[in-house]
Amino acid sequence: MFELKNIPLFSKLSDEQLSELHSYMYIHHYEKESIVFYEGETSEYLHILLDGDVRLYKTSPKGTQVHMHNFVAPEVIALFAAFESIPFPATCEFLGTGTVGLLPMEKIYNCMKNVDFSIALVSALSKRMRLLSSLLHKETIYSTEAKIADIILENPSVFERLKNNEIASILNMTPETLSRILTKMKKEEIITIKEHMVTILNKQALQNIIETNRILK
């Protein structure tokens, strides 16, 4: 399990400050598929992922889950919601077992007197803005082929850790669509898949798919 000092936001704090924060932190352990918080809930705590992987998703009016993003420990979850004191914009669910630390926001505000902490906070918020911009772009602009090419380039190990139906859920497509496009990529000798391990044979072809939104023959 990771500690606060392993997270960039807290890495510049002194040992004394870290020790004080840790004394106020509530540790919660979760089983697979446990919900950390639901979309629309509020909290006076900063959620810190200390162990495991979680996924964030929104629920449509029809009850369909729309995947937003995955976080891997160590990481801060729902940073904007915590500092803006607004409801969580998505539901957070563990993909496996894991641990979350809850820090009272009043203790976090005390840390803002530390210049290095404030700079790290601005950097973290800026990173989240870039992430949101990227997510919006991929969800509104990318075709299904481009989404799959992107995840293969950026995170090929996901195919070893998750089942195809879980990956399809992350990409907001059906398992059948994912399987069909992977088969086409293998046929075009862009990738190989053996024992759930993806090997890239033609990186340029994957980049072309992202740029053109289709598989070029």
Image (cartoon, rainbow, N blue to C red):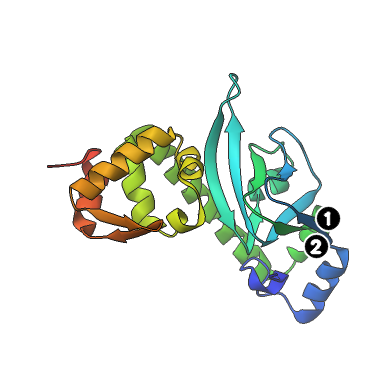
Structural crowding at the residue carrying mark 2, measured as other residues with C-alpha within 10 Å and reported as few (<14), some (14–19) or many (≥20): few
Q: Is residue 50 left or right of residue 119?
A: right
Residue farthest to the bottom, as pictured: 15
Are discs 2 and 1 less than 8 Å apart at CB? yes
- Amino acid tagged 2: Asn
- State the residue at coordinates (68%, 34%): 39
Depth check: give the residue in front, 125 or 94: 94
Q: Which residue is mark 2?
A: 110
- Amino acid tagged 1: Glu
Q: Image height check: is 89 above or below 164?
A: above
Residue 1 in the image: x percent, y percent? 70, 70
- State the residue at coordinates (20%, 46%): 187
Residue 207 visible, this angle? no
Residue 140, quarter of the rendered image: top left
Which secondary structure lies at badge 2?
helix
Which secondary structure lies at badge 1?
helix
Quadrant holding the C terminus: top left
Residue 6, quarter of the rendered image: bottom right
Q: Which residue is mark 1?
A: 106
Depth check: give the residue in front, 100 or 165: 165
Residue 19 in the image: x percent, y percent? 82, 75
Residue 43, numbered circle: none
Depth check: give the residue in front, 36 or 119: 36
Residue farthest to the left, as pictured: 217
